[in-house]
Amino acid sequence: MSKSIVILGTLDTKGEHLHLLKKDIEKRGHRGLILDLSMGSVPAFPADIPAAEVARAAGRDMEQLVAARDRSASADVMIAGAQLKVAELLSEKRLDGIVAMGGASMALMASRVMAKVPFGIPKVIATPAAMPTYIAEWFGALDVVVMQVIMEFAGMNNLVTAAIAQVGGAISGMVEEALDYTSLKLPFPSIAITQIGFNEGCAVQVKKLLEEKGYNVYPFHANGISDRSMERLIAEGFLDGLIDMVPAGLIEELFQGNRAAGMERLDAPIARGIPLVLAPSTLNVTGAGPTRRMKERFIDRPRMQIDEIRYMTRYSPDEMRQGARLYAEKLNRARGPLKFLVPLRGWSAIDKPGSVLYNPEEDRVFFEELKVHLTTEIPIEEVDCNLEDAEFARALVESFDKMFKEARTRASFTEAG
């Protein structure tokens, strides 16, 4: 069955390459639609959706954009226009996959456009600029394939044409195997849990106990990427509840930690009002190794070595107070049932009694500050154990199960399934 594939690129600089990609896609029996994001000279190659049309969709005139010579502002306009055109194609059922080809700027623009394309629709970015620092920005919460092309798209040679054929094959094969994104559903009730290596024991027990009660459980690694993806799935209606054992992506964002998950962390479950049980795993600790941003701020604190590049240290009491105020701001917007469970003898496997990271008195600072700034009545239950103890896993599941059943009785949230 023929599928429609949108091709993002700049025809003024990559016209020959984009048209070769379109021919390759069409040779495989699919329709290729070039959406031109050019911001410079007039392209020598035609587009299915010209740059001028993209700019008009965003309420701007292409000639004025070119005359202004403000590349950053022009890029913002073209991204906004492309997002609208992609939404239009989606509504017309003319978008089964989307692929972008070009340099670092093109990859960044494409990632912003693809962020508006629903989960399940194949997405490919092909670029010679797939450096780690860039990829972190492009991926975000996207279900996207980034293809590293080892040569620049400049001129034509056997290496370039072979790479373009591989790009065409990749996106074509993906759309051929993809299910209709509107048919993608999870069985009800589907529950997300967050976990990290430092609370794996608790997570394993929580998953087991939930499944024994008939829940379908989907774990997400709270590394700043997987938990962003979880938020997107929740926003799109895929999940019915959340036990967020590791909501630390928010405080990590505040202090530029390696697990930063964006200031949007927690927005989706709070906005949808799904049952939400929180625990504070690793809210009190952060990375202090060579890969950490702002490492000078943390490097002189007592640390625990995890491996040759990972060290963990504690947030200071003042940093934890700042974090608590941020979490309170989020939780005050809660629309559905919510509860916070607090273990009193450490918040992970690495801050048990005897560890250099163990400090329950400083941990208490976070919740004292949180309570001061909460304006809504949110239950906070203390459990006299470490977060990794079986007792705490049982408390999480019992709290969630009771909350979920009460919410179902009140019909206070919509089934995703």
Image: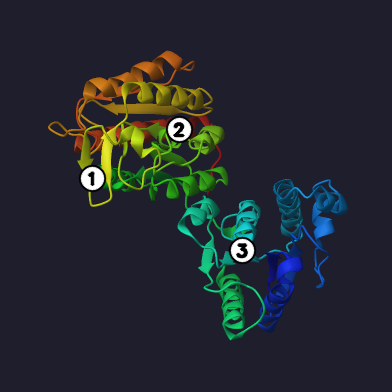
Circle on res. 254: 2
Name the amino acid, label 2: Leu
Secondary structure found at label 1: helix
Number of residues whose C-alpha sits closer than 10 Å to that of mark 1, classed few (under 14), some (14–19) or many (20 or more): some
Element at label 2: helix
Of the numbered discs 2 and 1, the one sitting upstream in the chain is 1
Q: CA distance from mark 2 to mark 1?
A: 27 Å
Callout 3: SS: loop
Local packing at callout 2 (Cα closer than 10 Å; few below 14, some 14-19, many 20+) is: some
Pick whichever, 20 or 308, lies toward us: 308
Q: Which residue is mark 1?
A: 201
Which of discs 1 and 3 lies nearer the camera? The answer is 3
> Which residue lies at the image location 43% right of the left edge and 41% below the top edge?
260
Quarter of image, res 391: top left
Q: Which residue position holds label 3?
A: 103
As rendered, which of 301 and 323 lies closer to the eye?
A: 301
State whether residue 261 is above or below residue 168: above
First in sequence: mark 3 vs mark 2: 3
Residue 33 picture location, percent across and down:
74, 69
